[in-house]
Amino acid sequence: MSRLSDVFSRCKSAHRSALVSYLTAGDPNIKTSEILLNTLAAQSDILEIGMPFSDPMADGPVIQAASERALAAGTHIQDVFRLTAQVRQQHPDLGIVLMGYANIPFVLGFENFAKQAVSAGADAVLLVDIPPEEGHICDAIFQQYGLDRILLLSPTSTEERIQLVCKHASGFIYYVSLNGITGADMGDMAAIEQQVGHIRKHTTLPLCVGFGVKTAKQAQEVGNFADGVVIGSHFVHTIPTHIADLETMNQALKQASLSIKEALLA
Amino acid sequence: MSTDFTYDLTIHHAPDEGGHFLANGTLFGGCFAAETLMQPLKEIETAFFEAWADDEFQAERLSLLKHYAGRATPLYHAQRLSKEVGGAQIYLKREDLNHTGAHKLNNTIGQALLARRMGKKKVIAETGAGQHGVATATVAALFDMQCDIYMGREDMRRQAPNVFRMKLLGANVIPVDSGTATLKDAVNEALRVWVANCEDTFYIFGTAAGPHPFPIMVRQFHTVIGQEARAQCLEQAGKLPDVAVACVGGGSNAIGLLHPLRDDDIRLVAVEAAGYGLETKEHAAALCKGKAGIIHGSLSYLLENDEGQVQPTHSISAGLDYPGVGPELAAMMESGRLEVDSATDDEALAAFQTLTKIEGIIPALESSHAIAAGMRIAAGMKPEHIVLINLSGRGDKDLGTVMDKLAVNAEGEAA
Ligand SMILES: Cc1ncc(COP(=O)(O)O)c(C=O)c1O
């Protein structure tokens, strides 16, 4: 079994939803990022480590700015792998997903990327702009290296697309709760629940819900019907808010993740 | 041409089902889009191919191109310029005389008709030079659609007259501050807005790039340029051109001119912006200097660093200041069918002045790159040869930039 499926079975036995957290690697700089990633990892079941990119087309202002800070601080893809390895060393059971845009692994070469991702301890890859139709450029390699490929579904996904995505995804499926970019306001909870229920008819993969989840209450509500709750912008936001003081930044991130974690345990 | 022009509506050299253009086993194009956009893009694809096969749609499109845009645009034998250059005969395809002053309207008429057919009430677009923004705002006015144009703040400064034109036409112009505050960032922002509003909004993409079906769709709407030019050249000169030249930002005027000529025995030349020089980092020459990369939904050539981060570009012309290029041009280059050339800021500026003084035609700075390279190519050829250059737009929008630049250059010379 893959580490991700272990994570979900553990959560299932504990009758709770998994906390899937996101931070951009190298934000606000590499040294601080290592501390923040480990702080967040301690509260999370799965950590999505963002690979900074110059043109984050699917991200809202909060995560765009995170990418800009990380790149301005000189974060290279090797730093992303190094940070991943450091997190992995301290958190052997954590699920780790490398998340970002196609061009980073494409330019590195998918094989080279997969090799380094695996040796750093990543379990899966989520590339926002490689839909199943374009999986021909990477799927075989990721499979060969044992990396799960997380795919997205959204409110615009038709029946046909749901089937296509379920066929090609592994690890878990990420349901984007709204038509929009990261950090937008959450859509209607009842509609999201209904759609998640519908997707379940097509797959046995765990279903995580994200985009727009910001409060403990929302996390709890989503946790009632989803296998995992993805929180990104809400955590990333603690970085610019406390940019002048790294200690409070780390504390704020810890607090934010603790309160979500508690909501999921309740 | 006074009589109606007959266009070939067959789709030649279509990409595969997924929008991939293949060249020597290398794949370009495709649909590298986020899941949320996949269905809206599929809907546009379906609607486009249905519309393209629909006589009524075509009749309305061609009627607007004729009576509203003023097509066919002339093919003009620039005799004084040819003599000045002292080589081949230079013919200019006068897209500057298309309504709104550039080729861009060919595409926006097509996409706006499609948007209306799909029941969309609102259109959005990105713009660099402002020509695509103006062309979009124009059709939005004509079709009574709400219109938001995303434009990098830097480009708003460079192309202020076009910003005012768009506002007069009733569009909202929304400044984009992220990244380098130019065209690529305007595309990012328009994509983000489209994701959130795809239910009621149509994204009128401005060039033959982006995710499938935009490259094929935008190309089809612009092939009027090359089809007319081909027939006009045969009629006026009794033969086809020997070389056809167009500037490249994303590639729409270039693919529009060159695609209908690709099965002829004609040299096809794409001219990129060399900015301060190809040997510097300050240019926008994705075909000449880029590597394979994925940006804005498409796999093509891209100006990027070794780790895939998109690099800032520079060109005197906002419409060419883009790090990517349309996938079909990339595939045509890869297969050896397309030659690539470039012109620096200074060469473009010189060509701008030459054409203005010698022919009384003020070209857009974008088009001035094609003029510069076309003159260079013509100079090395014989008087019986023909060089066809796409004069993609007129230069009124650039007068401020040219004025500033000439003043700076004069100061430099005086010092
Ligand atoms: C007059 C003119 N020519 C050329 C271009 C470049 O675009 P494309 O490469 O799509 O033709 C522009 C873009 O704004 C333009 O305004």
Image (cartoon, coloured by chain):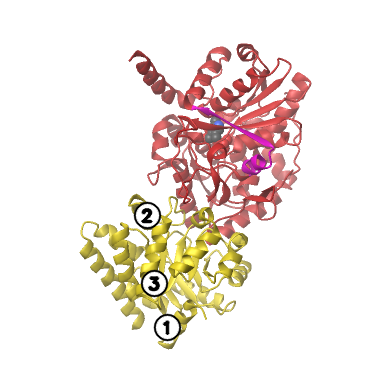
Task: Examine the rendered structure and indicate whether residue A243 appears above or below residue B105.
Answer: below
* Number of the label disc, if any, that sits on residue B369: none
- Left or right of A230? Residue B114 is right
Q: Does the residue labelled 1 lie within 8 Å of ligand 1?
A: no
Q: Does the magenta stretch include residue A247?
A: no
Task: Examine the rendered structure and indicate whether residue B382 appears above or below residue A66.
Answer: above
The residue under the point 39% across, 68% down is: A85
Chain colored yellow: A
Which is more N-terminal, label 1 or label 2?
1
- Which amino acid is tagged 2? Thr
| Magenta stretch in the rendered image | B328-344
Question: Which colour represents chain B?
Answer: red
* Number of the label disc, if any, that sits on residue A11: 1
Q: Is mark 3 on a helix, strand or loop?
A: helix
The one of B265 and B42 positioned closer to us in this rendering: B265
Which is more N-terminal, label 3 or label 2?
2
- Which chain letter matches label 3? A
Residue receiving disc 3: A88
- Which of the two discs, 2 and 1, sits closer to the camera? 2
